[in-house]
Image (spheres, rainbow, N blue to C red):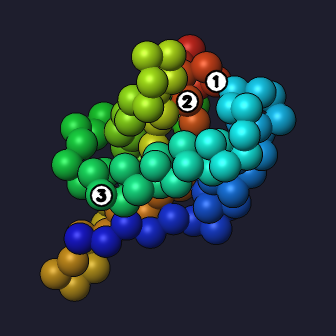
Amino acid sequence: MRIVFLPETLDYFNELTTILYEKEYFGFKESALAYVDSLLDDVRDNLHLKTAKAAPPYFERYGKGMQYATFRKSRATQWYIFFTRYKVDDEIVFLVRHISNNHVAAQFL
């Protein structure tokens, strides 16, 4: 099993640290970075263990036939990881195509 991120998805994770700090969700940039690192680690370690649901048609702009899994990082925030699962030779590959959270995407799910 392997987790692969599209470049634009990794770019979003990099931008997320700045967004969280500038919007004052975290008082220190280091805290925002630790939060994003924790989310990334959680996705890498646990995506294959999560219950996946079919992504609604709204999200097809990021890829066809996607699924999504949820990652709760606080009482107020749940992250949605959108991915496509492939079998390459004898290995299952999860291609992470998009990330969003309940504050942005919940109305579309």
Q: Which residue is mark 1?
A: 104
Residue drawn 45% across the image and 24% down it:
74
Dot 1 or dot 3, earlier in sequence: 3
Amino acid type assigned to the residue bearing label 3 in the image: Asp
Residue drawn 57% across the image and 65% down it:
6
Amino acid type assigned to the residue bearing label 1 in the image: Val
Q: Which residue is mark 3?
A: 45
Would residue 63 appear left or right of 89 to someone viewing this image? right
Quadrant in which residue 27 is drawn:
top right
Q: Position of residue 31 (x, y in %)?
A: 62, 42
The nearer-to-camera label among 3 and 2 is 3
Cα distance in 3D space between marks 1 and 3: 24 Å
Instruction: Please say if 60 is above or below 88.
Output: above
Mark 1 falls on what kind of element? helix
- Of all residues, the one furthest to the right in this rendering is 22
Q: Which residue is mark 2?
A: 101
Q: Position of residue 79 (x, y in %)?
A: 48, 33
Q: Position of residue 53 (x, y in %)?
A: 30, 35
Residue drawn 30% across the image and 58% down it:
45
Cα distance in 3D space between marks 2 and 1: 6 Å
Amino acid type assigned to the residue bearing label 2 in the image: Asn
Quadrant assignment for the N terminus: bottom left
Q: How many marks?
A: 3
Instruction: Please say if 60 is above or below 84.
Output: above
Toward the viewer: 103 or 107? Answer: 103
